[in-house]
Each structure stands twice: as structure tokens, then as C-alpha cells.
Amino acid sequence: MSDTMGTQSVKSIDALRRGLDVMLAIQRSSAVTLQELHRQTGVSKATLLRILKTLQQAGWVERSEHDKRYVPASATGQSEPVAAWRTRLSALAAPARATLQRLVPWPIDLGVRDGTAMLILDTDRPRNGLAVNYRALGFRPPMLLSSLGRCYLSFCPEEERREILAALARSPNDFDRGARRPENIRRMVAHARDLGYVARDPTSTSLDSPDRFGAVSVPLRQEDRVVGCLSCAWLPAVKGEREIVSAHLADMQQAAQSIERKLAQAGFGPPPPTNA
């Protein structure tokens, strides 16, 4: 029997397809509640709970006890080359980040592009004691809401930006709707390049609500590419954006330049292709 004939005669597994649909919805949303999954997939909550338990046991999904959201496990779907690239980037950036963290009393994050979201590779938040559960954000801050994502979009090559925005424009998620407003994106990019940094989206629809924390990011560049971004998060009740920028932007930019030099000296190349 040929492979083609075999495929035609074999029935598909509906339960597996539902599980894959749920996993895809979680990846697209970065952090999602049971109710949101039910609305997005049309799968009953009882079935969703069984699927989610299976995905958790398999190590594909984690559940934040803070706000009851399901998030992709941090290493899910990473190929060996991609994981190795991210590990090396984190290691090469570590000395400059450590120096920066000694100068800045707020947590510094390193993020990279992960499809249509950003991925936080590691974080100093627990040591700093900032009352922000970054795991509740799924380690994958949304591209159009987070300072990391907005920074990446603002400084990456135009062709890559168009590719990301085209994918986001097809997303069913409310927080991706901004991709359908090209004029707003153009203003964001121009503003970011003028200032040299990007702040998170201050709207109340953001997953990282302005009542919880503020954030600004600067890019890590190699020629015309962006390999990642550095962000600083703080509590707005303690400091305002202007104060943070005045006190720490120069240090963040200096750290970014130090990392860029280290990457160039190490011959660090572009990220391997992914299926994202």
C-alpha cells in the first residue's frame, strides 16, 4: 500500500485535532483563561480542562496560579539550534546586564522575537522583589502591547516588520488589532526612532496593566537586524516614565552597545529559521 493510499484510508483523530487547536490558541494568545479558550475554540470547558491537563502533563503548557491563565511552557517548540542560539545570546549579554542591573534598581529583562510575540529569555525580577508575576504574562509579551515587542517592531527591518504585522492582522486576539492600523504603527516607529527607546502600550486593554507596572525597552542590533531587546520595568506608583528615562535610559543604551560589541566580537550570527 502506498503512503498516499494509506493516508486516504485512515481516519483523522478528532481529539488530537482539538488538542492542537487549543495549543495553537494558547500560543497565539500568550496567556489565556479557560473562558477565553472556550470562546476562541468553541470547545466545551469540560473537554478543555481534560486537554489542558494533558498538555500540562506533557510539559507543553503551564498554568499561572496568580491569574489562572494558561501559557506556553518557556521551551515549548524550540528546535535545538534555536535553543542553542538563545542560550548563547543570553550568555554573551550576561556581563553587561549584570553591570546594568547594579546601576538600575529595577528589573532588567532580555527578550527575543518568538513568532508574533516576544520571549523573555531570563529575568532578574525575583531578586529585585518587584511585585509583578511575569510568568502570568506567559514569558511571551504581546508584540503590540509590551515595550519589548514594540521596540522590536520599531527597529527591525521594514520587510520583517511587514511580515509580523501581516500575521498579527490575521489574529483573532483583541490585543493584536493594532496591526490593522498602519498609520498608528508608522507613528510608533517614527517616535521610537526619534527617542531611541519604546514604552509599553499604556492603554487599559494591555495584559500588563498600567496599574501594575511600566516598562521601556531599547534594541540590541547587528547591522540592520534586531537580535533582541533590553527592558526595564518599574512600579508607576513609585516612579514615572520621565524619571526612569532621565535616570536610566543612558545606562540601558550603553549596556545595549556593550552587548552589541560582544556579539560582533564573538561572531554571533542571526537566529536560525523557525516554524513560527
Image: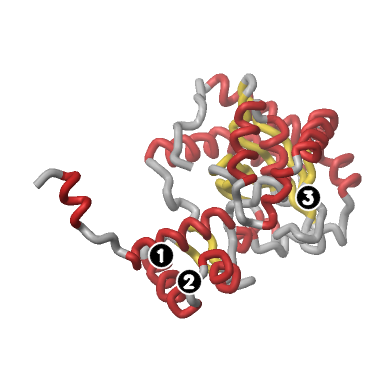
The type of residue carrying mark 2 is: Val
The type of residue carrying mark 1 is: Arg
Q: What residue would you read off at disc 1?
A: 18
Disc number lying in front (1 or 3):
1
In primary-sequence order, the first of circles 1 and 3 is 1
Binning the other alpha carbons within 10 Å of mark 3 as few (below 14), some (14 to 19) or many (20 upward) gives many
In the rendered view, tell whether residue 189 sits above or below residue 179.
above
Disc number lying in front (3 or 2):
2
**The furthest residue to the bottom:** 46
**The furthest residue to the left:** 1
Q: Quadrant of residue 65?
A: bottom right
Q: Which mark is residue 201?
A: 3
CA separation in Å, label 1 and label 3:
33 Å
Tag 2–tag 1 contact (CB < 8 Å): yes
Residue in the image at 62% along x and 45% along y: 168
In the rendered view, tell whether residue 69 sits above or below residue 266.
below
Q: Which SS class for mark 3?
A: loop
Q: How is the image coloured?
A: secondary structure
CA separation in Å, label 2 and label 1:
8 Å
Question: Looking at this view, is 18 or 189 the one in front?
Answer: 18
Tag 1–tag 3 contact (CB < 8 Å): no
The type of residue carrying mark 3 is: Asp
Whether residue 269 is visible here, answered yes or no, is yes
Q: Which SS class for mark 1?
A: helix
Q: Which SS class for mark 2?
A: loop
Q: Quadrant of residue 226?
A: top right
Q: Picture coordinates of residue 140 (x, y %)? A: 59, 52
Q: What residue would you read off at disc 2?
A: 43
Residue in the image at 54% along x and 61% along y: 71
